[in-house]
Amino acid sequence: QVQLVESGGGSVQAGGSLTLSCVASGYSGQCTYMAWYRQGSGPERELVSRILNTGRITYAESAKGRFTISLDNNKTTVYLQMNSLKPEDTSKYYCQGVCGSLKWGLGTQVTVSS
């Protein structure tokens, strides 16, 4: 059973940094892509960043210049380096990936205080 397992969330002050990690546990292949979403103000999750196994990267406008996504050489672990964090970045962050099939992690909370 393939599971996406996130770690690295926490509480920081505005201007601080956090790095989120997500590993495709139980998967022996290469994930087609992996991504980070966060819970929006409504029921939808909003894309923060996505990285394909080809290396192509997409960032939300709110993440550009502050967040960096990367993938390990095995294409089964994705990282999100978040710098210059703002209170509006406070949310639950979810890992998503196509690792054999579409998977979601359970999420990790990021709280940024002013």
Image (cartoon, rainbow, N blue to C red):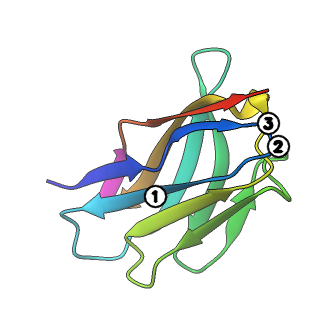
Q: Is residue 69 visible?
A: yes
Please state which amino acid type lies under the numbered disc 3.
Answer: Lys
Mark 1 is surrounded, within 10 Å at the Cα level, by few (under 14), some (14 to 19) or many (20 or more) other residues, namely many
Q: Is residue 101 above or below residue 92?
A: below
Q: What's the distance in space between the residues labelled 3 and 2, CA to CA?
A: 10 Å
- Farthest residue in the bottom direction? 73
Picture quarter containing residue 24? Answer: bottom left
Q: Of label 1 and label 2, which has the lower sequence position?
A: 1
Q: Which mark is residue 21?
A: 1
Please state which amino acid type lies under the numbered disc 2.
Answer: Ser
Residue segment shown in magenta: 99-104
- At 32% from the left and 51% from the top, the residue drawn is 4
Q: Which mark is residue 62?
A: 2
Instruction: Residue 102: say if magenta.
Output: yes
Which of discs 3 and 1 lies nearer the camera? The answer is 3
Q: Of label 3 and label 2, which has the lower sequence position?
A: 2
- At 68% from the left and 52% from the top, the residue drawn is 17
Name the residue beneath numbered marker 3.
86
Magenta segment main secondary structure: strand
Picture quarter containing residue 19? Answer: bottom right
